[in-house]
Amino acid sequence: MPPFDIAIASMLLMLTPVALAPCCAKSRNTTIYLSFFIAALASLTSVAAGVLAVRDETTVSAVLQMGLPVLPFHLRLDPLSGFFLVVIGLLAFFVSIYSMGYVRSFHPGRSIVRFVVFYSLFIFGMQLVVLADDAFLFLVAWELMAAASYFLVMYEDEKAENKRAAYLYLVIAHVGAIAILLAFGVMAAQANGFESFQGYTFDSMRTTSYSPGWATTAFLLSFFGFAAKAGVIPLHVWLPEAHSVAPSNISALMSGVMLKTSIYGIVRITFDFLKEYPWWWGGVVLTLGLISALLGVLYALMQHDLKRLLAYHSVENIGIILIGLGLSMLFTTYKFPLLASLALIAALYHTLNHAIFKGLLFMGAGAVLHATHARNMEEMGGLIHRMPWTSALFLVGCVSISALPPFNGFVSEWLTFQAFLFSPALHRPILSLLIPLGAALLALTGALAAACFVKAFGVTFLGHWRGHHPVQQVHEVDWYMRGGMALAGLTCFLLGVLPTVVINWMDILSQQLLGAKIAATTGQFGWLWLTPYSSARASYSGMNVFIGIVGVVLITWLLTHAGKRSIRRVPIWDCGFEKLTSRMQYTATSFAMPIRRVFGFLFNISEETRLPEPFRHVAYPGGLYYRLRVRDRFWNWIYKPIGWAAFYTAKKIGNLQQGRIQVYLIYSFVTIIVLLVFLG
Amino acid sequence: MIIYPFIIEALQVALLLMAAPAFAGWVKTVKCRMQGRTYAGILQPYRDIAKLFGKEVVLAENASWIFRSTPYITFGVMVMIGGIVPVFSTELPFGAIADVIALVMLFAIIRFFTALAGMDIGTAFGGMGASREMMISSLAEPAMLMAIFTVSLAAESTSLTQIVQVMGHGKFILRPSLAFALLAFIMIHLTETGRIPVDNPATHLELTMVHEAMVLEYSGRYLALIEWAGMMKLLIFSLLGIAIFCPWGIPSSATPYEMLFGFLLAAAKLAVLGVVLVLIETSMAKMRLFRLSEFLGSAFMLATLGMLSFFILE
């Protein structure tokens, strides 16, 4: 079966729960198991289609007799779409398994059918985005994806914060969509000057040569549009809001794969359609990537809501992906196809990695939320004893995202660093300044991410329980949820120790887009070694690192346990104080305090300490009131003025509305006169 | 001879393991001598480790598997790193497993798990140590990467053995960027190995401790492994500095005679480096925690300046 047919079958399968769920709505459990089983199956099929499409270098297009009369729907499966089908399908598969357990825990009063329908449409929309081959179908799919995810964010719609978050998301998504629409318009006009609708097919956009001015316009518009969806700073404000209130399986999908559709869009438009560009485009992408990466991780460090923390990390990781893309664009401009391929593969590999580990982390956060009914880390602690599986799998996610070998996050960051180290090839003064700074900021980002995940894991899973209800009420999640997380964790590991296999598989992408392959396994070393340029230049073998560490650990363990030696368990050493409570532990806020002091100038911090009324004397404090508020500066810098301006304008225009019929008649009269004068 | 490089590899790791306490003892001895105190001799760290291995482990009731596995992970990763840094010869079969970037991240694994172990018991000391350590490392690690990048740009490789080959056996070029990188590396060395002015390995004073606070709850063989790994870290960091900035004389082939020469040379370099370390430590006072951001920030800036000057001047 050719990959294209498999992809179509997968998408049709994905749509069946939409029709099926309302029919069997009587039984809640049947709906859940059936729908998510079908969704998991469809996702797995989509992975198969993608893997085959990339492996066989298939490029198949088809025209559906649907859509506009003059512009039927065009579909196309090429290796780039195939790769993103794999990204989407892989995470959707894990999340669908996870959902079988997670969705059952929803409040019985909520409609499951609504959830299932939008869940399926959401994944279907994402698949359609990467398969669409004309601007119209692309935007239809894009909007389907946005609308479905809007309803999913709104799922618990009685809460005010959900409504606010969903509204913000919808507004920014649509501002972005308008920019993308305009970009397509510009490109279609360049393709055949609006003479027929054929200009809107991606095929004609691919073959057109653009004039520099219009190409820049199209690039900037589309980049703005995709950046809004990807959450690039300063367009990131919707992300922490929406991801933290959405159900956790939806957060996993939104953060893991929905953001990646905008990476797809950027790659498709820049590398496939526009192809030639001045160096500063790459500079812009690189700079925005750096800003997003650094600020994203710093904002994440300041969060104590587990899901908000993860959401800010998505901003960071999108930044890292953009750094790779930006470098790739720079190398392309200066005609270094091999180096451009290295950077592009680094970016795409990070796209895949981030999808998996961020999905894993959000699923883990969902498991914690499910068990403790809290998102605030200050009310957790010691969960490693109650939830051993979840904590171990969450730890895998933490290690992966902190870019520690031998897990997957390290491989893509390593490739990105390698790309940086090749940049002396670029001769341009401003780049000589930007690139060392960029490498420095990326290194800083990586180290801060590790600090952030020590905090997230340490405060949530280690130490003592800080919650208000007894810890005995906290239980490990069921096997479906564990299964979904375990598969994601295993994938993190495999992508970390077998990067050569993956890179050999996806090398065709850079071959097609940039005309060069990175030699992942050449040289004197075998498939175990990742040598992206030459073996003398750099090499890394995740598998050997893993075997080495495990081997030494095992030998040491055996040696230290050769004699029979006991371990004595004793109460915690409390310096003789004897009244140690769980409130005396380090909290998430206090953990981040040193970093907050060092990087405080980047935040809008208000801190207040005072003694409560009856004990006004410092010598006899009865209690202490402490309030800390750390806010995103961008909200005050950009969004508040825009919001204010919008309200101000609306109010001024509202003055027209007097509510008296005479005034409205005068308006019509004046309008007619004006029209007669100007058009008559 | 396919087996021969592996023998060298095993020899190097065994030698590093054995020599690490001696080097730590040497630094301590010189320090005592410099400060006019009596000293217990170079062999004291061996006696400490042996004593700790013989002792019973006392473990807090709520210690989880993270706490119990961290000493093994720390030790395992440290031994792994020991197999990667070229010391006596650049013909290391393990040298290709991880390049310098991976090496820095291997150190990060140790830090990550040590910090987690610090938070595991849930006492304020552990959390304090973890929080401070992560703040310090979030500035020190990028500085270290930048210092290393500057060298690898000059050597056009991130592979350590290749760097040693190019810098040690190639044409000698005076590079201003390397001066910046060296300065930054020394500052990072002091930070990473927990020495004055950043941390004081000899103190258990609440206000000043960083690394000791995280491992405060350890005892018995766990503590022995952690202490041993700490000594390994001091030795390996020094050897890493030597391999990157002063690689002259590290043999590129691995005949027994050359290896002996390499070994003696490394020992001599280490002895000198130990004295330099002590000189820095003795002439400085421990810094306040929040002054550290300036110290590490300047290390970071120096390293970035090094890379910038490579781009602009070279």
Image (cartoon, coloured by chain):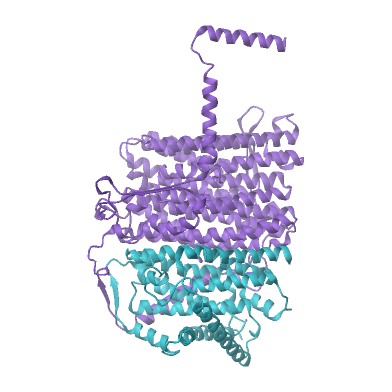
Chain colours: A purple, B cyan
Residue closest to the far left: A578
Residue A445 visible (yes or no): yes
Question: How many numbered marks are there?
Answer: 0
Q: Position of residue A651 (x, y in %)?
A: 51, 23
| x and y percentages locating residue B6 in the rendered image | 56, 83
Residue at the far bottom: name it: B257
Asked whether, in this view, residue A215 is left or right of residue A33, the answer is right
Quadrant placement of the C terminus of chain A: top right
Question: In the visual, does B238 lie left or right of A197?
Answer: left
Residue sitting at x 73%, y 38%: A214
* Residue at (73% x, 65% y) in the render: B313
Regarding residue A144, the answer to whether it shows in the image is no
Q: Taking A241 as reference, is A513 left or right?
A: right
Position of A679 relative to B151 (above/below): above
Q: Quadrant of residue A380?
A: bottom left
As rendered, which of B137 and A185 lies closer to the eye? B137
Residue B145, position in %: x, y?
58, 66
Residue A551 in the image, given as x and y percentages of width and height: 46, 76
